[in-house]
Amino acid sequence: MISGVLGAFVSLDLFFLYFFHELALIPTLILVGVWGRGENRNYAAFMMTLYLSLGALISLVGILLLYIKSGTSSFNIQVMTDQLIQSPLSVGDQLWIFGILLLGFGILVSLWPFHSWAPIGYGAAPTAVAMVHAGVLKKFGIYSLIRIAVPLLPAGMQGWLHVIAFLCLGNILYCGLVAIRQKDLNLLIGNSSVAHMGFVFLGIAALNVIGITGAVVVMVAHGLLAALSFGISGYLCRQTQDPQMDRMAGMLSRLPFIGTALIMALLAGCGLPGFGNFVGELLVFFGAIKSFPVVTAFALWGALVIGAVYMLRAVRTLMHGEVSETAKSIKDAETSWQRLPFVLLLGVLLLFGCFPGLLTDKIRPSVEAILEQARQQGAPKMEGKAAFPLDDVPENIVNFDPIK
C-alpha cells in the first residue's frame, strides 16, 4: 500500500501515476474487508470498493481522453504539457474532459455528494489503514487535479469553478452538521476529515497563488491531523472495543497524556491558531474571498461555528464528567515508545502552525509554475481580468507568520 502511495506521488507519467494509485487502492480494500473492525466491516469494504473503483475507472477515462486529444505519443506529463502549450485543446474539449476528471478524482477525495464511503470506511478500517488512506492516499485526487487538470485544461477548469465552489460547501456544511450528530468517535473523525476536504476544493476554486498554496497547506496539515486522530482513536478502541464517546467519559483524569493529545488534535481540527490547519484555512479564505465572497462567508461560518461545535462537544463528552467504567479500564501511554508517534505528529503540526514559511516557501514556486503553464495555453480572461493572477498576492500573507 505504501509502495503504491510513493509511486503515485513521484510519477511523472500519467499511466504510472494511475497504476501506482491502483496498486495502493487494492490492498486498502482487502485490509478493510479482512482485517477491519466492527460488525459493518464487510458493508464498509463493499462500499469503499464500489465508490473507489468507480472513481478510479472514471479518472482513467478522463486520462485516456486527455492523452488521445493531446495528440502526443507519450503519457509523460512534461511532454504532454509542451504539446498542449503549442496546440491547446478547444474550450469544449477542455470542459468535458475536466468534468470527467473532476467527477473521478472527486469520488476518490470524497467530494460531496460522493463522500458517504469515507466515514463508514474509516470507521471500519484498521488503525494503520485509516491513518495512511485518510492522511496520504486520499490526497491523490486533489494532487492530480492540481498537477494535471489545472495546467493542461485551464479553460475547462474555469468553466467548472462555480460548481467546485458550490460542492465544497456540501463538504464543509453538510458533513460538519452530520459530524455534530455523531456519538461514535471514528465516525466523528471520519466526517470531520471529509469536511476538511471542502477547504481544499475552495482553495483550488480560487485559482490563484494564495488559494492553491493554502489548499496544499491544508492537505499537508490534514494528513498529519488525520493520522494523529485515527491513531489515538485506534489506541482507545483497541483497549475498549467500543468507539462510543459517552462510554469513555471522564477520560482526561485517567489518561493525562492520551487525553491531552486528543484534545490538541480536536482543537487543531477546529482550526485553532498555532496549528498548521489554521494557516492553510486562512490562506484559502484570503485566496477565495474576491472570487467567491458568499461561498467564503459560509465556509468561514462552517469552520468557526460548526467545526467548533462538534469538536468541543467531543472534548466535553470524552474528557469531562464522571469517569465511566470503560475509561477506568483504559491504560495511558506510559512508555516513550508508545508516546513517540503522537508527539511527532503533534510537533510537526505545531511547527508548521508557528512557522508556516517552512511550507509556503516550498509550495509557492511550484504553484506559480503550474499557473504559468496554464497561462501559456492562452487561458481566457474572466470578468475583464487576466486568469490565474500571479502578481496580486500580498507577500506578507503568503509568508504569514503568527509569531511575528
Image: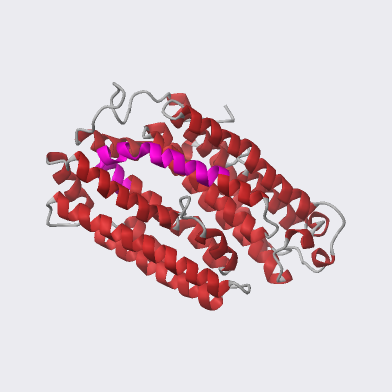
In screen coordinates, is 341 left or right of 385? Answer: right
Q: Residue placed farthest to the bottom in the image?
A: 34
> Of residues 270 and 43, which is closer to you in this image?
43
In screen coordinates, is 69 left or right of 107? Answer: left
Q: Quadrant of residue 1?
A: bottom left
Task: Say above or below: 187 vs 290.
Answer: below
Residue 369 location (% of width, % of height): 29, 37
Viewer can see residue 13: no
As for residue 203 lying within the magenta part, the answer is no
As for residue 151 lying within the magenta part, the answer is yes
Q: Residue placed farthest to the top in the image?
A: 384
> Of residues 179 and 376, which is closer to you in this image?
179
Viewer can see residue 10: yes
Instruction: Please report the bounds of the magenta region as a residue range.
Output: 147-173
Main SS category, magenta section: helix
Residue 291 location (% of width, % of height): 41, 28
Task: Say above or below: 272 vs 339.
Answer: above
